Image (cartoon, grey):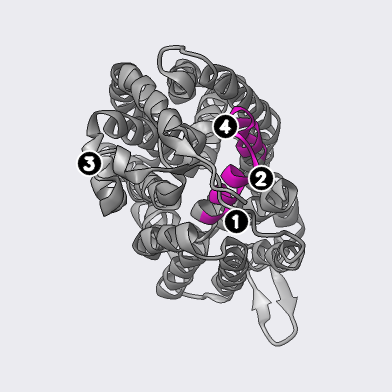
Amino acid sequence: MVGVLLAANMCCYLARMVIILLVQPILRDLAISDTEISLLQGAAFSILFVLCGLPMGWLADRRGRRNMLLAGILVWSSMAVLCGMASSYGALFAARVGVGVGEAVLTPAALSMIADYFPAERRGRAMAIYYIGALVGTGLATTLGALVLRRLDAGLHLPLLGGLASWQAMFCLSGLPGFAVAALLLSVREPKRHDRLRLAAVPGGQAGVLPFLAGQWRTFLPVYASLTVLQFCGFAITAWVIPLLVRHVGMSTPAAGTAYGTIMMVVGVLAALVGGWSGDRLSVGARLGGRFKAVVYAYAAFLPGVVILGLAGTPLIAIIGLVFEIFGVCMSAAIMYSVLQDIVPNQLRGQAIALLSMSATLIGATCGPTAVALVTDRLFADPGRVGDSILLVCVPVILAGLAITLAGLPSYSRAGRALRAASFNPAG
């Protein structure tokens, strides 16, 4: 089950993140600005992802999750192919919106299923393995994509579709693996729901997810804010790291894509496994902050990585910064949803995850890339200073996020103990 969901996540991120390799060709062919390309990377994807996220979470808490996933995979794969057929900015924007609609299903449904397959002390490792799909998908989007771009330098001619530019062909190819994974998903069974909470035992529990979160805002506000900050900075850097390597340290686009993708698949996978393992260790016993404390360790790697990357003057220094940055953001992303599941009951879990995913997407994936682009376009008015833009946008936000995380550790511990005391497994 985890293997199939890993493959689904891999296809999701392949379709979603291939655009980071295609920034320069799209800028050239469509004659658009950095700010406009950032909207394709973030806002276009996020619009219906955010609007559909909470309804999808509600369905994941009440309906069959396997069939939800099947529908979602088919939608985002089809829309990824349509991205490749777009010949104007408006058409590409609309197709990217469709990719977000399909992917809104994945996170709440898949993670709710994993939580019901595994007990809490093994859940973090299972979710980390699932998250590796995102890293492999992103890595393939850049490494394999760079290889394909070299082969498709003159474009591609397909029956019925006619001639396609190299970036259009890459979008089409990014959607195809999803159809194979949809067939594999039919082999996965729907798990029984476990760890049902007596909702009357917590403030707002019976009224729904929003009253539940509001009743324990001292616990959930730091969790949501801390993890959203990491996603904001992570997406801001991911969106612009290849242009930074091209513009600032003189690498070619294929070389930058290969370097980034390789680091993502090696260092990122290691970071995800470390995050899952350390989170499981911290979740056992009475350690301050429980699993949430692992996020502090992620910040400790992430901050120096961002600074080194932003100040880098050579490819070697930039790659060193990337190693630390990718380790920190991937460690945090691998554990972010298991952090939440340790303090949310089963009946509300899909919706709580959907809200975190919506926050990470709306604030992170949408605002992060655009914030960097606006600073580059409006403040510096120099595409070569994208590294300075990353530093100016991300460093203050990272410091604030680390402070919020440290302040939230005690309340997280109390909430985890309360949930364990109120949980039960229904007979049968």
Image location (x, y in percent) of residue 387: 41, 30
Query: Left or right of 60: which side holds 114?
Result: right
Q: Earlier in the sequence, mark 4 or mark 1?
A: 1
Dominant SS of magenta comes to helix
- Residue position for label 1: 12
Image location (x, y in percent) of residue 249: 54, 29
Determine crowd level at label 2: few under 14, some 14-19, many 20+ residues with C-alpha closer than 10 A.
Answer: many
Q: Amino acid at mark 2?
A: Gly
- Residue position for label 3: 214
Q: Are marks 1 and 2 in contact (CB under 8 Å)?
A: yes
Q: Amino acid at mark 3?
A: Ala
Q: Which residues are magenta?
A: 109-129
User: What whole-number distance in Å separates the C-alpha atoms at marks 3 and 4?
Assistant: 24 Å
Quadrant of residue 178 in the image? bottom right
User: What whole-number distance in Å separates the C-alpha atoms at marks 4 and 1?
Assistant: 26 Å
Q: Amino acid at mark 4?
A: Ala
Q: Earlier in the sequence, mark 4 or mark 2?
A: 4
Q: Nearer the viewer, residue 290 or 193?
A: 193
Residue 124 within the segment the image draws in magenta: yes
User: What whole-number distance in Å separates the C-alpha atoms at marks 3 and 2?
Assistant: 33 Å
Point out the residue furthest to the top here: 287
Query: Left or right of 7: which side holds 96?
Result: left
Q: Are marks 3 and 2 in contact (CB under 8 Å)?
A: no
Counting labels gives 4
Determine crowd level at label 3: few under 14, some 14-19, many 20+ residues with C-alpha closer than 10 A.
Answer: some
Q: Earlier in the sequence, mark 1 or mark 3?
A: 1
User: What residue lies at 35% left-to-right and 30% top-to-bottom?
Assistant: 226
